[in-house]
Amino acid sequence: EVQLVESGGGLVQPGGSVRLSCAASGFTFSTSWMSWIRQAPGKGLEWVANIYPDGSHQYYVDSLRGRFTISRDNAKNSLFLQMDSLRAEDTAVYYCSRDRQGSRYYDVEYWGQGTLVTVSS
Amino acid sequence: QSVLTQPPSASGTPGQRVTISCSGSSSNIGTNSVNWYQQLPGTAPKLLIYNHNQRPSGVPDRFSGSKSGTSASLAIGGLQSEDEADYYCAAWDDSLNGHFVFGTGTKVTVL
């Protein structure tokens, strides 16, 4: 059974940083594309970033490039999201996902339960 | 800002058929596969339809997807009370170095 468990969320001050983690199990992590997706309270879904299976390449939504960094540790079956210079509008539930990728094909197949990040003073 | 546009709401009575549209462009739906996600209240989203019209194991066949040009649709046949949820379309977008995009979301209400 695929399991994705996010951690690291909580209350952080504007301008601060936080590192989210996602522990993966039940599938071959080292061959899987992975993403972070967020959802602000009462709002829709926003894809944040994804990362190649070997960690060599990442894609980001343009609006967050430079402040957020996605990374992974395949030896520990873990995905990370480093979030810097946080703003109130970054307040959201952050989901980790396992994805599938092919020619002209991409989907977010499995989702974690999410971790809430609240940016407030 | 999402580049996939959905109606904010849709509704129907039990047993009715409801259709949700998703309008995109040549850089996303026009070129790449379309997926649909269901988000029940208070839960994480779940993959409902992938690759335009494929259902993951366990998804009832009353959910169906289609695509035409730069638009896609999700149909829910035989609407049930447990279908009341938010629905999102999504696709890879080849513009701006490449990124994944979700639709604006549609709230389905069972009357």
Image (spheres, coloured by chain):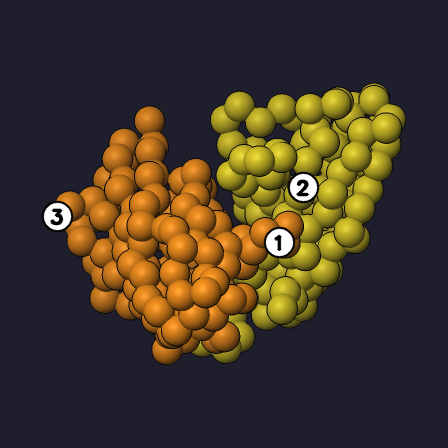
Marks 2, 1 in one chain: no
Foreground disc of the pair 3, 1 = 1
Q: Nearer the viewer, residue B26 or B98?
A: B98
Foreground disc of the pair 3, 2 = 2
Quarter of the figure with the N terminus of chain B: bottom right
Q: Residue furthest front?
A: A121
Do the numbered discs 2 and 1 sit on residues whose CB atoms are within 8 Å?
A: yes
Residue at 54 percent of width and 59 percent of height: A46
| CA gap, disc 3 and disc 1 | 33 Å
Q: Which residue is disc 3 drawn over?
A: A75
Dot 2: what SS? strand
Q: Which residue is disc 1 drawn over?
A: A44
Residue B1 in sight in this render: yes
**Left or right of residue A67, residue B77 in this image:** right
What amino acid does circle 2 point to? Answer: Asp
| CA gap, disc 2 and disc 1 | 9 Å
**Left or right of residue A44, residue A95 in this image:** left
Marks 3, 2 in one chain: no
Quarter of the figure with the C terminus of chain B: top right
Q: Nearer the viewer, residue A21 or A37?
A: A21
| CA gap, disc 3 and disc 2 | 36 Å
Dot 3: what SS? helix
Do the numbered discs 3 and 2 sit on residues whose CB atoms are within 8 Å?
A: no
Task: Say which chain tag 1 marks.
Answer: A
Chain letter corresponding to the colour yellow:
B
Chain letter corresponding to the colour orange:
A
10 Å neighbourhood of mark 3: few (<14), some, or many (≥20)? Answer: few
What amino acid does circle 3 point to? Answer: Ala
Task: Say which chain tag 2 marks.
Answer: B
What amino acid does circle 1 point to? Answer: Gly
